[in-house]
Amino acid sequence: MYLGIDIGTSGVKVVAVNDDGAVVDQSSAELSVSRPAPLHSEQDPADWWAATNKAVANIAQDHRRKARAIGLSGQMHGATLLDRDGKALRPAVLWNDGRSLAECAELEAALPALGEITGNRAMPGFTAPKLLWVRKHEPECFDKIAKILLPKDYVRLRMTGDYASDMSDSAGTLWLDTKKRDWSDEVLAACGLSRENMPALFEGNAFTGRLRGELAEAWGMERVPVAAGGGDNAAGAVGSGVVRSGDAFLSLGTSGVTFLADDQYRANPAGGVHTFCHALPGRWHQMSVMLSAASAIDWVARATGFADPAALYAAAEARKKPADTEIFLPYLTGERTPHNDPLAQGVFFGLTPSSDAVALGQAALEGVAFGLADGIDSLHATGARIETLTVIGGGARSQYWGKILSSVFDQPLIYREGGEVGPAYGAARLARLALTGEDVEDVCAPPPIRNVIEPSEKLRDHYAARRPLFQELYRSLAPLFRENV
């Protein structure tokens, strides 16, 4: 038996996985987010620990007693600032906090080699710009910092007493030399920090310590070892079997993420691609991130009077044809890949008297597909290639949208049984790998295929002709977005 613990933004999830790889028990405990000022997003690290204890306690005692190892995953990028006694100095600044936009520009100006070292542009979501903000706006707090941990690694500290992290989560701090899989002294110095402020680094399938004796007793467990684990996307990929070079998943949730596993380091910071270490040794991954994916469809459904997004999907499918003149730019909350443009906005273009709600819904499905395709092009620009693409997330429920996406990408889409198994499951797999030393491919098999959607030749050619107009609209409007803020 293995436990996987995921420190998410909305809650902590714990799963118990048996030796056959089946989830035999799971539990969760909710978390809330504090937004004390515009663009601010914070959580109290003590809440993570309380939620972890609650979620673990709700796992059946027999499963806890039989557990042989624990793995961790969690929300990435969160800045947890600790003093010399390991106490939190302030609430943690989360991944979706946008206050450090100015500090991103300052960091890139001060260190032109940042993208070359880290494989990424400086963005407010990353940890490093957050520390520059703290240094500028809360200097007394900055001066007291002894250690900086990511959310799951703060929970690890409370579990084992160790200051440790894994490569995949640490790559999201912007302090890692991602190719070398080691802290970058140069980037740390640019933030007024050093290795002394950082946790020890481990591969995701390596152990970092054991449960403290008193905690093991409280949890009704042995002093089992704790694996390094991974950031949420990398751990989710381990759980979904996306571990071999060329394997990818497309997550159609609030945002749209294309995650591509690779056995080589290939960066494209200029294209807005995130290049991180995978949670397994000798492997990396690239991600394109679209900030509004299924959430853009939800917004259009509300704005055009559909009862819910499912009604929009059904009406568009019954219409049985692509949009005529209508095009939708889905940048409702700015965009990351490939534009790295927080000021980009949503736009409907090409409206005529015949443009009804269904036509707008169809254009929305196509616009998100075009935006995701731009991100995939940025991944391909690194020299990597998507061999298999599995679809997960809420948007995966619409097979009609899948046909549009497949035709725009000119790529078959794979739908698997069980949908998204989640980062906690991947964390449990990493714990098993750390304990048994089994082959990664043997443990990290993907779920069985439910069906495959192939591109339509007719739609592929139609969308290939329409997509350049979509791209030109963004280029033409980008200067106007800056004037319309």
Image (tube, rainbow, N blue to C red):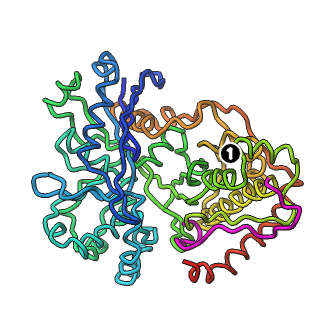
Q: Secondary structure at mark 1?
A: helix
The residue at 59%/47% (across/down) is: 249
Q: Residue at x 44, y 69 (%)?
A: 123
| 214 horizontally vs 359: left or right | left
Tally the marks: 1
Image position of 422 with respect to 76: above or below: above
Residue under the point 42% across and 37% down: 424
The picture quadrant where one finds residue 327 is bottom right
The C terminus lies in quadrant: bottom right
Q: Nearer the viewer, residue 309 or 26?
A: 309
Answer above or below: position of 245 versus 478: above
Note whether 221 is above or below 177 in the view shown: above
Residue situated in front as seen by the camera: 474 or 456: 474
Could you tell me residue 194's position as x and y percent?
A: 21, 68
- Residue 439 at x, y percent in the picture: 46, 35
Image coords of residue 253 (percent x, y): 58, 48
> Where, quadrant-wise, is the N terminus in this rendering?
top left
Residue 436, located in which quarter of the rendered image? Answer: top left
Q: Amino acid at mark 1?
A: Pro
Q: In terms of depth relative to the viewer, which is nearer, 91 or 230?
A: 91
Left or right, 428 with respect to 344, comes to: left
Residue 96 picture quarter: bottom left
**Residue position for label 1:** 309
Q: Which residues are magenta?
A: 336-357
Which residue is rendered at x = 41% and y = 27% of the image?
26
Is residue 465 at all visible to an observer of this figure? no
